[in-house]
Image: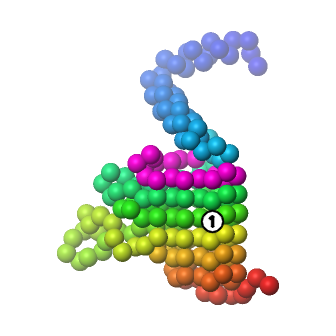
Amino acid sequence: MSPMWWLRGIFLLRQPALVRELGSLLAERVFLDSVRACYSGVLIDRDVLIQGWPEGGLEMKKGVRIEKGTMLCLGDAKNGYGSLSIAEGTWIGQYNNFRLAGNSQIRVGRDCMISQFCSIVAANHATKRNARIKDQGIDAKSGAVIIGDDVWLGAGSTILPGVSVGNGTIVAANSVVSRNIPEFEIWGGTPAVRIGERN
């Protein structure tokens, strides 16, 4: 590395757009550090995005690990805030999407594996015909999403509002789960159906 690398850095700081970007990155890191400080024994990657905290409820137990690119969106001022709880030892892989709003809930049990690119959605938009969907807000009947203990969600799977996934369940990659799954079964497809069970 050239001994003058720091001069190049000083020169780059003359770019207003770069200074704004650095300020934004610093603010995100400070925010994430404040979240980490509240959850002892939880590992949160520096590229995790958390929105709507602390207005939305967030509970994470010891041994939870959240990997790069995952979004925990607890809600916003317009649509209200939900609550997310993640129990001990659960691993949440890269680029997952948790969506809450309007007093909705997502509960994830102990020792689960949430593979990459999964979406867990606890609230839907209302869809009445007399108004644009984007103006209607959240459908209050969506219901909580409950994921039991020892559940494995395959990459790219989607769990829809109001669904309960039983203990020990496996959901195959790229499946869309729109109804409750009993314990220790294996489901897959769009919409997901039973394809087996754990012996």
Left or right of 37 in this view: 113: right
User: According to the image, what is the colour scheme of the structure?
Assistant: rainbow
| Furthest residue toward left | 130
Residue at figure coordinates x 30%, y 54% from the top left: 78
Question: Does residue 62 show up magenta in the picture?
Answer: yes
Compared with 189, 43 (above or below) is: above
Residue drawn at the location 23% of the way across and 77% of the way down: 129
The residue at the far right in this view is 199
Q: Is residue 92 above or below residue 42?
A: below
Picture layout, residue 152 above or below residue 68: below
Range of magenta residues: 48-66
Residue 73: x %, y % from top left: 47, 54
- Type of amino acid under label 1: Gly
Q: Residue at x 55, y 65 (%)?
A: 107
**SS state under label 1:** loop
Residue behind mark 1: 109
Q: Nearer the viewer, residue 142 or 39?
A: 39
Is residue 184 left or right of 100 when viewed as pictured?
A: right
**193 lies above or below 42:** below
Residue 41's spot in the image, x, y percent?
68, 45
| Number of disc labels | 1
